[in-house]
Amino acid sequence: MQQPVFCDVADVRARLGAAGYLADDAIATTVFLADRLGKPLLVEGPAGVGKTELAKAVATATGSELIRLQCYEGLDEARALYEWNYKKQLLRIQVANGSSPDTANDGRPGGWSEVEQDIFSEEFLLSRPLLTAIRRTEPTVLLVDETDKADVEVEGLLLEVLSDFQVTIPELGTIVAARRPLVVLTSNATRELSEALKRRCLYLHLDYPTAEREKAIVLSRVPEVAEALAEALVRTVRALRALELKKSPSIAETIDWAHTLVALGLDTLDEAAVRDTLGVVLKHASDHARAVAQLELN
Amino acid sequence: MNNGLLDRTVAFVAALRAGGVPVSLAESLDAVRAFGAIDVLDREDLRAAFAATMVKRPPHRVTFDTLFDLWWPPLLGDGTASRYGADAGDPDAGDPDDADPDATEPRQGHAVPADRDALRAELARLLLDGDEDGLRRLARAAVQGLGRADAQPGRQSWFSYRVLRQLSPDTLTASLLAQMLDGQDRDGLAEKVARQTIRERIKQFEAMVAAEVRRRLAEERGVERIAKTAVKPLTDQVDFLRASRDDLVELRRQVYPLARRLATRLTARRRLGRAGRLDFRRTVRASLGTGGVPLVTHHRPHKPHKPELVVLCDVSGSVASFAHFTLLLAFALREQFAKVRAFAFIDTVDEVTPMFRPGEDFPDVMARMTREARLVWFDGHSDYGNSFETFAERYPDAITPRTSLLILGDARNNYRATAATTLKHLAASARHSYWLNPEPRAHWGSGDSATAAYGDIVEMVECRNAAQLQQFVERLLPG
């Protein structure tokens, strides 16, 4: 077991805070446990509540490098783990063939096996994020972003890598992590991740924050905004979330809204201001219409 | 961890499992390890640690929180009278001794008015400030002072409605609004927003009172007994026919996420099927990278078979919420179908497809449907027979051999003619036909239910909650 990075929950909160991420009790405790128990951390929640941001903040707070594996449909082992650079291998073989008529025939046996040894070496290995993270000796945070977008087979691959922190490459042998990276997986829950993966992870559900925390976040991200305006902004966003919308505004949108208001030089949030800038927070025409009707913005 | 705490944790895990949260052995071991790693004296840290190790699905979180509050209560019994004052920390917070019923009153069920007023004043102040800790302390004091009733000698019972009736936080709304707006415009946006803020805080307070009452009850009667009644069913397990207003709002919120999850799973299943024809161009292009040797072949994706969907639904009072949810889901999934058409009926039928255009406002659709569509011909009671006949007569082209016909309703026909022959014709001209019945299977065929007549013609499926509906949709859509 390697030395944990954080000494207690308060330490996590303080260091994340210094990295510009305001963590609440649940976030701080869960990050602390992920570090202490050496388990991957699965963060799930709606878009724009700061899942990826959390991983970046953890990297900053622990002085680690962030290695990111962005998942998408069709992601495979070759893109996630490692790949042999076969164009380069091909060139190497051609070079060997070109010189072989002279050399191979004058009594040098094993020309091929030498080439084979050569083309399956480090030089021809393309290391992808998972392998890179395992081989690093410096502190590392591995971010597997939008895990739900990847296919089910990738989950199997992740399971293998994340439970033992080792990778077997047939030609090279097994590579064991020199230093276990802190792993953060994020998911938008567009599909349910497999039980097996969830069981091996610590789970953190990030939801829309409390009014107090959201205000603090807005104030720290957009320092130009006045406190009273931030308060009004957060309350209005919460009123919008209470409506039945297709896509409720998230923290990212609240921050965008604050930026917009500052850029427009508005210092109060009245009906006209809300009506004119509503497009920043609501991205569906029907949501827009609904908000205008329900909040009587006409 | 000492034995007492270990036993408590094991019992808590058992209660979680009984409450429907699947906790594996490995996860409970993690929870115990987490217990050792954190400062157990901080209750919120403990909650977070247990949640991180054992609750891996958001819907289970409510159950978890309820049970956690029961198993790891913030304090025992009355707590101490001095602590309420000491913790308040704010000397201006009214006189804490006044707000504490034990100080002014011997142990009796009913509070004296002075006490009640003091509590109400304190409540108003805390609601205005949104002071969460203060509210929690107040909930504790209020339950202690107002919520107790002596059930039998030596036994007490606790009621949240007593507390809420006497404090009646809702009646504070007007004065709170006035203070919060502070002379601003009394209508329009500011008022809406302030009202929402107050509503949220009152709801929070009510939940705190309910939790406190559960805690006191659990001390009186044992945790296990209270746990059984305290756990609410998950949203997707809520019976359509018994759903409350709040349940329905929650269900509607689930429509889009559910449709998205279903669509993702269907696409994944389709991709897993056999690959389509060889894509010659892409294969040759890819082979250039490997010296002209086609190491990997590329294939065109299969064109998925998309059925046309015709939904015929009973929207009379008893089953309206079921029809509503199912229609919303069908239209949220419209991309999975070649075409979706919806027809609503009570005792006659009308097409309602245009009301579900993309971008329409969902919550209003049901109200508009009953208002604008012509669904009543005779007396406004369900008449399946006449509806089927009218449908066959007015929309003869709606059902084609590519159509999946979906009928929604409880088949309670008020003892009228069933028009089984017409339905047989309709079913025969469709590719598939299904009947979704929101009633429990055990009730089918009782009273005026015509399930026997219809069940022979069309396959009838029990569909009482969102989970069953989801299963059905997966079956309906081919991979």
Image (cartoon, helix red, strand yellow):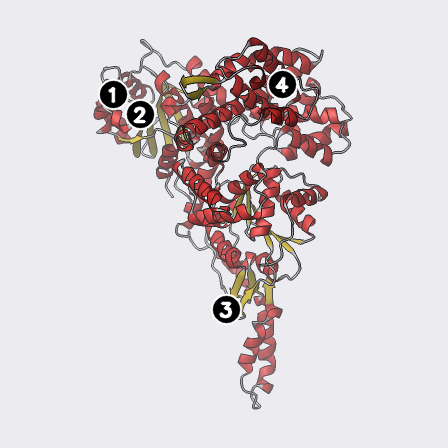
Q: x, y (%) of residue A155?
A: 49, 52
Residue B449 tag number: 1
Sequence order check, earlier mark of 1 and 2: 2
Q: Which residue is mark 3?
A: A170
Q: Are marks 1 and 2 in contact (CB under 8 Å)?
A: yes
Q: Is residue A44 above or below residue B252?
A: below
| Residue type pointed to by label 4 | Asp
Q: Nearer the viewer, mark 1 or mark 2?
A: 2
Sequence order check, earlier mark of 1 and 4: 4
Foreground of the two, B334 or A113 = A113
Q: Is residue B38 above or below residue A225?
A: below
| Residue type pointed to by label 1 | Ser
Q: x, y (%) of residue B39?
A: 59, 43
Q: Is residue A80 above or below residue B140?
A: below
Sequence order check, earlier mark of 4 and 2: 4
In which quadrant of the rendered view does residue B308 lie?
A: top left
Residue in the picture at 52% in, 49% down: B33
Q: Which residue is mark 4?
A: B97
